Image (cartoon, grey):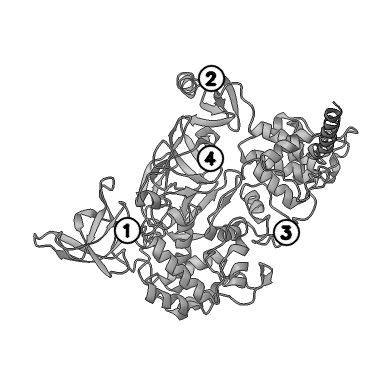
């Protein structure tokens, strides 16, 4: 009995010694007034703890930290390909104090692209400054707009805080919107304290309240809603998509089907991506199998306009760059025609060049990279034209105007430029845009790429990659050679860079020449060989054909590189435009088999390779007759181990070019 009592006492001592270990799971957030909100954001990966196990709910938040939180809270993050990140950053982030290699650069870039922040007039973002209440209000309000949550400010009351006058005018409307929505509240003494800093618990509360508006709980999954210029109103709720759609189609008081305040079906309108988006070939949202299915996996980034073709609760059917595909409903925003505030369009400038005005559906602003090529002859000055592929142009109502492709975007890149190394260097010297300006922490008085013309020409000769294209690509990816990885690592194409840490991941080269050579080898292997991992035609192209299908998520990457080539050509004398006078494209039923290109005219000759897809451009260099008298075209080979190849003329159509 005595031994039993001793054993029980010993066990009690052991259990009591375990109690502190069990309760040690409690942290500095346990018992906090807003523990629930913070832990909810932690579970979503929006707020993280510190390495020492603390949460620090009372710690004040910097602008960089807040940018990351707001981008993650509203699911506005992009997923850029390695080679594209620095190009995208160069176009989007112009802040002197946001280096591309910093941990917060991707979040700041996403915030800028979504229209959440513009930074300061001195081209700084001030990432280490503490976020103020008025700044927080503006960034959250803009995030709501980016997610399609619009508020009619004419219908909400004016601010009545005692310190209204201390709120900067640029923030007042956003403060008014967020206080009206109950996302940010005033203080008990009826002040707003706009310049006060925000603590982590305050940010958590604001994010949770805002997320409840963007991602609200739903009693029934689908709603039949009416629309006006800037909002929707639920008319009736339904358990199934089919019932909601049927109601809208048969009742004049409803216009769209919504799910959690997101439009998932409409009569007509535009689809705009709101996240990184993969475009699948079939409605089951799956990729096929085999080499071709692996090669053709188009994806695009946020703010891409897609032609809307229809939808269900499982997918949105769209057209991207003239090719039909299917996307997840969660990654696109459907904008009915009456709710459109703008659209991207093309126009001819005063010099007869084509200009693409790109509309940001989050900010309501237009942007342009300048002249991208020759305007089609059918264009009239002062008229807007619309196209989803950069070649088939319509009026705003959809009436066809013309089909006219851009030369440089469709030029097979195994061709040669007319320009010498000296002429390429002249362009680089004469047109460098940053003389006297500070970029990536350095003030520029020379053009860093000047002198590299010989490298581009040597590699064109030895590797059959057009030197004008390689130069345009390097200019685009490296910001004319001014990017940090170009300067520190001689990396002109962004190879090795990753989204999480592009600077550290980027490959280092001894010279610019080594970087250009490595790019040419990689491009040849993966993009310019028919059996390459990402082959879709050895052209710049778009999201339907060419390098752009897999090289970059930006759907206009090919157009932008082609635009650089066009502007270089115009400056140097227009000797490359239409140099290859006979551009055609493959035309065949690619659902059955590929199109064979042979070593000579006639089917008895060896098949050198087979094009996997219809529409791929070819350079026609001559004609020949087969033994039966049929015409075959001699073309520049897509397989670079061969110079020429032959294909029956019935399978090649003339490519209509903008002239």
What is the number of callouts on the image? 4
Return the x and y of residue 515 as percentages of the image width and height. Answer: 51, 72
Q: Judging from the image, what secondary structure is the residue with disc 3 in?
A: loop
- Quadrant housing the C terminus: bottom left
Give the x, y percent position of residue 6: 86, 31
Nearer to us in this view, 115 or 488: 488
For image coordinates 38% across by 60% down, the residue present is 539
The image quadrant of residue 10 is top right
| First in sequence: mark 2 vs mark 1 | 2
In the rendered image, is residue 350 in sight? no
Nearest-to-viewer mark from 3 and 2: 2
Q: Gap between marks 3 and 1, in whole Å?
A: 45 Å
Disc 2 designates what residue? Answer: 238
Give the distance between the C-alpha atoms of the residues marked 2 and 1, in whole angstroms: 49 Å
Residue 222 visible in the shown view:
yes
Q: Which mark is residue 124?
A: 3
Answer with left or right where residue 89 lies relative to residue 191: left
Determine which residue is flagged by label 4: 331
**Inter-mark Cα distance, 1 to 4:** 31 Å
Specify which label sits upstream in the sequence, 3 or 4: 3
Which quarter of the image is occupied by the N terminus?
top right
First reached walking from the N terminus: tag 3 or tag 2: 3
Q: Do tag 2 and tag 4 residues touch (Cβ < 8 Å)? A: no
Crowding at dot 2, Cα within 10 Å, few <14 / some 14-19 / many 20+, comes out as: some
Label 1 with label 4: CB-CB less than 8 Å: no
Q: CA distance from mark 3 to mark 4?
A: 31 Å
Residue 140's quadrant in the figure? top right
User: Percent x, y for residue 342?
Assistant: 54, 42
Q: Can you give x and y, in whole percent of width and height, for residue 271 in the image?
A: 49, 39
Disc 3 to disc 4: CB gap under 8 Å: no
The label shown at residue 617 is 1
């Amino acid at each position: 009995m005595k031994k039993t009592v001793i054993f029980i006492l010993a066990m009690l001592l052991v259990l009591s010694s375990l109690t502190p270990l069990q309760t040690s799971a409690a942290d500095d957030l346990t018992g906090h007034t807003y523990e629930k909100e913070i832990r909810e954001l932690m579970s979503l990966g929006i707020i993280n703890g510190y390495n020492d196990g603390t949460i620090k709910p009372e710690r004040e938040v910097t602008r960089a930290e807040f940018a990351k939180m707001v981008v993650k809270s509203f699911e506005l993050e992009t997923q850029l390909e390695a080679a594209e990140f620095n190009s995208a950053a160069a176009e989007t982030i112009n802040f002197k104090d946001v280096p591309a290699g910093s941990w917060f650069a991707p979040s700041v870039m996403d915030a800028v692209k979504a229209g959440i922040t513009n930074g300061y007039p001195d081209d700084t973002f001030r990432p280490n400054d503490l976020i103020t209440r008025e700044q927080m209000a503006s960034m959250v309000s803009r995030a709501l707009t980016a997610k399609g949550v619009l508020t009619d400010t004419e219908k909400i009351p004016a601010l009545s805080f005692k310190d209204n006058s201390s709120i900067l005018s640029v923030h007042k409307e956003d403060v008014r919107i967020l206080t009206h929505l109950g996302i940010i509240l005033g203080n008990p003494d009826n002040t707003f304290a706009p310049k006060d800093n925000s603590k982590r618990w305050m940010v958590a509360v604001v994010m949770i309240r805002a997320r409840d508006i963007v991602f609200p709980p739903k009693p029934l999954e689908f709603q039949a809603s009416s629309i006006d210029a800037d909002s929707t109103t639920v008319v009736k709720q339904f358990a199934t998509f089919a019932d909601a759609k049927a109601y809208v189609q048969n009742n004049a008081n409803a216009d769209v089907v919504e799910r959690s305040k997101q439009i998932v079906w409409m009569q007509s309108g535009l689809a705009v991506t709101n996240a990184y988006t993969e475009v699948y070939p079939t409605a089951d949202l799956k990729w096929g199998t085999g080499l071709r299915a692996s090669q053709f996996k188009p994806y695009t980034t946020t703010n891409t306009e897609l032609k809307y073709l229809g939808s269900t609760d499982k997918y949105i059917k769209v057209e991207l760059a003239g090719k039909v595909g299917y996307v997840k409903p969660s990654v696109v925003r459907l904008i009915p025609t009456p709710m459109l505030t703008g659209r991207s369009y093309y126009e001819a400038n005063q010099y007869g060049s084509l200009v693409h005005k790109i509309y940001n559906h989050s900010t309501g602003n237009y942007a342009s990279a300048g002249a991208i090529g020759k305007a089609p002859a059918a264009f009239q000055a002062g008229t807007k034209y619309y196209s989803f592929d950069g070649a088939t142009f319509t009026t705003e109502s959809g009436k066809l105007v013309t089909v006219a492709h851009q030369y440089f975007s469709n030029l097979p890149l195994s061709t040669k430029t007319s320009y010498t190394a000296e002429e390429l260097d002249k362009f680089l010297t004469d047109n460098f845009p940053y003389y006297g300006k500070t970029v990536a922490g350095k003030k520029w008085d020379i053009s860093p790429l000047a002198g590299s013309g010989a490298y581009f020409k040597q590699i064109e000769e030895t590797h059959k990659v057009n030197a004008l294209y390689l130069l345009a690509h390097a200019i685009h990816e490296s910001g004319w050679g001014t990017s940090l990885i170009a300067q520190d690592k001689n990396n002109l194409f962004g190879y090795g860079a990753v989204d999480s840490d592009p600077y550290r991941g980027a490959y280092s080269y001894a010279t610019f020449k080594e970087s250009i050579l490595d790019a040419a080898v990689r491009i040849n292997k993966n993009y310019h060989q028919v059996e390459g991992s990402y082959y879709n035609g050895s052209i710049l192209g778009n999201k339907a054909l060419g390098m752009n299908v897999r090289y970059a998520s930006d759907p206009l990457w090919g157009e932008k590189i082609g635009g650089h080539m066009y502007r270089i050509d115009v400056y140097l004398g227009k000797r490359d435009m239409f140099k290859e006078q006979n551009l055609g494209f493959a035309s065949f039923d690619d659902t059955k088999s590929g199109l064979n290109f042979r070593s000579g005219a006639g089917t008895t000759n060896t098949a050198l390779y087979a094009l996997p897809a219809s529409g791929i451009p070819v350079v026609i260099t001559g004609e020949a007759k087969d033994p039966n008298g049929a015409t075959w075209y001699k073309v520049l080979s897509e397989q670079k181990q061969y110079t020429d190849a032959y294909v029956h003329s019935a399978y090649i159509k003339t490519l209509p070019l903008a002239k």
